[in-house]
Amino acid sequence: MSQMFGTDGFQVARWRRRVSFAVALMLPLLLALTGCETLQVGSDYDRTTTFATYHTFTWLPRDNYGIANPLVIEQTRDAIESALEQKGYRYVAEAGQADFAVDFTLGSHERVDVRTYPRPYGGPWVWYGPRWWGYPYWGTGVDVYRYREGILAVDVFNARTHRPVWHGWAKKPLSREDMAHSAEPIRKAVEAVLARFPPG
């Protein structure tokens, strides 16, 4: 009993409280940093399509991408062409010579994420012998994050039947750096999406 409430026991208990408190303080920060850096990627495809027969591609004709910045459109087209050519596909301008046609969409929207995490708060503390003794309760902390999420979608169509055969997407919270210098984030998103093409 004396060992439990001795100096060593008090220091261990105080150290444990400090570690628990530090972890609780750091958790929302780590979650925020993780959320800001995470690129989520997904894809789906037509299971009846034989992608091994695809060798050439062209762009699906489109008049308007709905994006005010024409540089972003060119950066995305260049990144997609480069990624497909690195996979061995060849771009052709004539739609009649292409095996598949490619299209993409870009967009962004405001998001609000609410996260909860355990938060310690002190008490009750009682006088026991020469020292005060107590323990923390655990409550719930709430953090609200507002951010802009960017979304890239790449679609592949059979050039002869015009049927959609593959869809890939990526989304990521956008930082000010991403929006000011978009070429690198776009390239990374395109490469992450087209890493899943062809499927299988």
Image: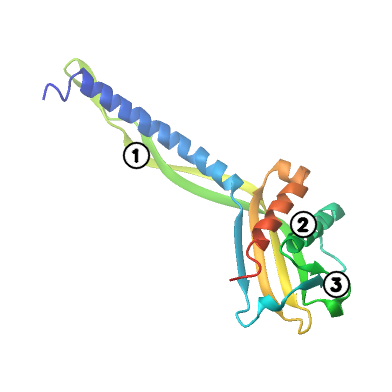
Q: Position of residue 31 (x, y in %)?
A: 51, 44
Identified at 60% across, 46% down, the residue is 37
Callout 1 touching callout 2 (CB < 8 Å):
no
- Relative side of 134 to 18, left or right: left
Per the image, label 2 sits on a secondary structure element best described as: helix
Identify residue type, mark 1: Trp
Colour convention: rainbow
- Relative side of 34 to 99, left or right: left
Per the image, label 1 sits on a secondary structure element best described as: strand
Identified at 81% across, 57% down, the residue is 78
Q: If the image is split into quadrants, where does the N terminus sit?
A: top left
Q: Is residue 126 visible?
A: no
Callout 1 touching callout 3 (CB < 8 Å):
no
Mark 1 closeness class: few <14, some 14–19, many ≥20 residues within 10 Å: some
Q: CA distance from mark 1 to mark 3?
A: 58 Å
Identified at 45% across, 34% down, the residue is 25
Identify residue type, mark 3: Pro
Residue ranking furthest to the front: 88
Disc 2 versus disc 3: nearer the observer: 2
Of 142 and 170, which appears nearest the observer? Answer: 170
Disc 1 versus disc 2: nearer the observer: 2
Q: If the image is split into quadrants, where does the C terminus sit?
A: bottom right
Q: Which disc, if any, is residue 138?
A: 1
107 shown above or below 180: below
Mark 3 closeness class: few <14, some 14–19, many ≥20 residues within 10 Å: few
Q: Which residue is mark 3?
A: 61
Q: Which residue is mark 2?
A: 79
Q: CA distance from mark 1 to mark 2?
A: 49 Å
